[in-house]
Every structure is written in C-alpha cells, then in structure tokens.
Amino acid sequence: MFPVVIRYWAGAAAAAGVESETIEAGTVAEALASAAADRGPALQRVIGISSILVDGLRSSDQDRDENLAGAVQVEVLPPFAGG
C-alpha cells in the first residue's frame, strides 16, 4: 500500500467536498473506489465521467488497475464547457 494523493478539480471538488485527500491503496482504482465509497454517489458519478491523470499523465482504466510501485498523485478532471 502506498499513499495516493487525489486532487479534485471543479465539479469533482464540489462533489467530494474537498480539494484533495490522501488514501492508502495498492492501485489507483482502489484509491478512487475508496474515495467514492467514503464521499458518496455524486463523487462516484463524477469520477466515472472524468479524465484521470496519474503523475501528470492521462490514465486508462487498465492502467489504474496496475499495482503501485510507490506514492502517486492523481488528478480528477471532470468535463467542462467553455468558449
């Protein structure tokens, strides 16, 4: 288990009720699932439609299931509109 720092942006922060948190987990998927379970269905929905970055790189669903080799920073970026 390693520390996973999760940073929430925009609507993800609103759904989580915090801008960031640290969760001990073996994979990024475990950390996100734990955060969603602790913070409720609104965050779970937002995570499901968000882009996930791990240490600054876009992460696929498959990547998130890989065992961690150390601490990572995860960013949850919900879709946004603008012009």
Image (spheres, rainbow, N blue to C red):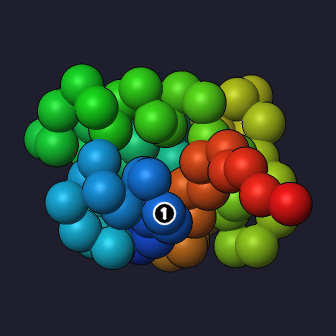
Is residue 2 in sight in this rendering?
no
Residue with the most extreme front position: 83
Residue depicted at x 19% and y 60%: 17
- Which picture quadrant has residue 77? bottom right
| Residue 2 x/y as whole percent | 39, 66
Residue depicted at x 68% and y 51%: 80
Instruction: Please state, as top left, top right, bottom left or bottom right, where the C terminus lies in the image.
Output: bottom right
Query: Is residue 18 depicted above or below 40 in this figure?
Result: below
| Residue 42 x/y as whole percent | 28, 32
- Out of 12 and 37, give the one closest to the viewer: 12
Query: Is residue 70 depicted above or below 38 in this figure?
Result: below
Residue beneath disc 1: 10
- Out of 42 and 67, give the one closest to the viewer: 42
Count of residue discs:
1
Instruction: Please state, as top left, top right, bottom left or bottom right, where the N terminus lies in the image.
Output: bottom left
Within 10 Å of disc 1 (Cα), the crowding (few <14, some 14-19, many 20+) is few
| Residue 67 x/y as whole percent | 58, 45
Q: Secondary structure at mark 1?
A: loop
- Which picture quadrant has residue 53? bottom right
Q: In the image, is 44 to the left or to the right of 17?
A: right
| Residue 41 x/y as whole percent | 24, 25
Residue depicted at x 57% and y 64%: 75
Query: Is residue 71 depicted above or below 63 in this figure?
Result: below
Residue depicted at x 76% and y 73%: 56
Q: In the image, is 41 to the left or to the right of 30?
A: left
Is residue 12 in sight in this rendering?
yes
- Which picture quadrant has residue 14? bottom left
Q: Amino acid at mark 1?
A: Ala
